[in-house]
Image (cartoon, rainbow, N blue to C red):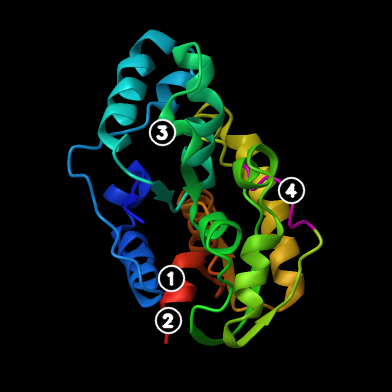
């Protein structure tokens, strides 16, 4: 299988360690992922704010760059949803790349049938369902199945696991007071679990939560699921 890495802007610019962790996990299970260096933003920010004409060339570029691969793996439910569900709307129909782009946990569990990647992470962890991963992709159990196979890890569900963290891309910029209030609700639910770490599949959500936690001096760490799975 020829597997390509689709690295979102947030990961590329702010959290490159997430991409590194994903590569480590994929190599550990016997794959040799490739990184097409010509890839750019998928166009989601422009698309979500109504600039479809500006997003369309990025969508076409993505499809051309990733067309030769058997599978395209992304550590973001948000960007995966953009390609799989909104590219057909943007481009007037499905393209080959849209049908073979997978969120990381979905690729591991659903496509490859792998749940135990040999990870070791002795900590009490709670999981945040990012909106796009849960609602657009329908991915709920795959991340949890992977976490339950991590040695030493205790998974504790929070009451508000499926509640939005308040980021929402440009929503957090346009409506900061609402965004902060939503983060406050989310963090309180996380605190009630007694977890030392909150884990998710979207770095944008984690960045939002981490900013709140640091400003409130709450000693809970945020980690992308790929980072947990890479730990040994």
Residue 220 percent location from the top left of the image: 56, 73
Confirm or deny contact between disc 1 and disc 2 (CB under 8 A).
Answer: yes
Residue at label 3?
97
Q: Earlier in the sequence, mark 1 or mark 4?
A: 4
Q: Marks 1 and 3: which is nearer the front?
A: 3
Residue 162 magenta-highlighted: yes
In what element is the residue under mark 4?
Answer: loop
Quarter of the image holding residue 230? bottom left
Q: Earlier in the sequence, mark 2 or mark 3?
A: 3
* Residue 91 numbered mark, or none: none
Residue at label 2?
231
Residue furthest to the front: 1
Side of 218 relative to 34 (left or right): right
Quarter of the image holding residue 19? bottom left
Q: Earlier in the sequence, mark 2 or mark 4?
A: 4
Residue 222 percent location from the top left of the image: 51, 66
Mark 1: few/some/many CA within 10 Å (<14, 14-19, 20+)? some
Side of 222 relative to 154 (left or right): left
Residue 33 percent location from the top left of the image: 30, 59
Q: For marks 1 and 2, give the CA distance.
A: 6 Å
Q: Marks 4 and 3: which is nearer the front?
A: 3
Q: Which residues are magenta?
A: 160-166
Please tell me which residue lies in front, 188 or 22. 22
In what element is the residue under mark 1?
Answer: helix
């Amino acid at each position: 299988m020829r597997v390509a890495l689709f690295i979102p802007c947030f990961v590329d610019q702010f959290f490159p360690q997430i991409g590194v962790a994903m590569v480590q996990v994929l190599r550990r299970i016997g794959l040799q992922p490739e990184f097409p260096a010509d890839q750019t933003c998928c166009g989601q920010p422009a698309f979500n704010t109504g600039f479809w004409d500006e997003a369309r060339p990025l969508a076409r570029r993505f499809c051309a760059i990733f067309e030769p691969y058997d599978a395209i793996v992304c550590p973001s439910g948000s960007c995966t949803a953009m390609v799989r569900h909104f590219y057909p709307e943007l481009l007037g129909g499905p393209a080959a790349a849209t049908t073979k782009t997978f969120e990381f946990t979905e690729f591991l569990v659903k496509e490859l049938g792998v749940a135990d990647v040999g990870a070791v992470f002795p900590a009490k962890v709670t999981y945040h369902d990012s909106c796009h991963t849960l609602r657009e992709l329908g991915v709920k159990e795959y991340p949890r199945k992977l976490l339950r196979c991590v040695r030493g890890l205790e998974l504790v569900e929070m009451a508000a696991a499926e509640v939005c963290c308040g980021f929402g891309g440009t929503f957090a910029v346009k409506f900061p007071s609402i965004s902060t209030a939503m983060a406050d609700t989310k963090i309180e639910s996380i605190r009630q679990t007694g977890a030392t770490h909150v884990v998710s599949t979207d770095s944008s959500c984690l960045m939002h939560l981490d900013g709140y936690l640091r400003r409130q001096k709450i000693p809970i760490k945020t980690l992308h699921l790929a980072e947990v799975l890479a730990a040994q």
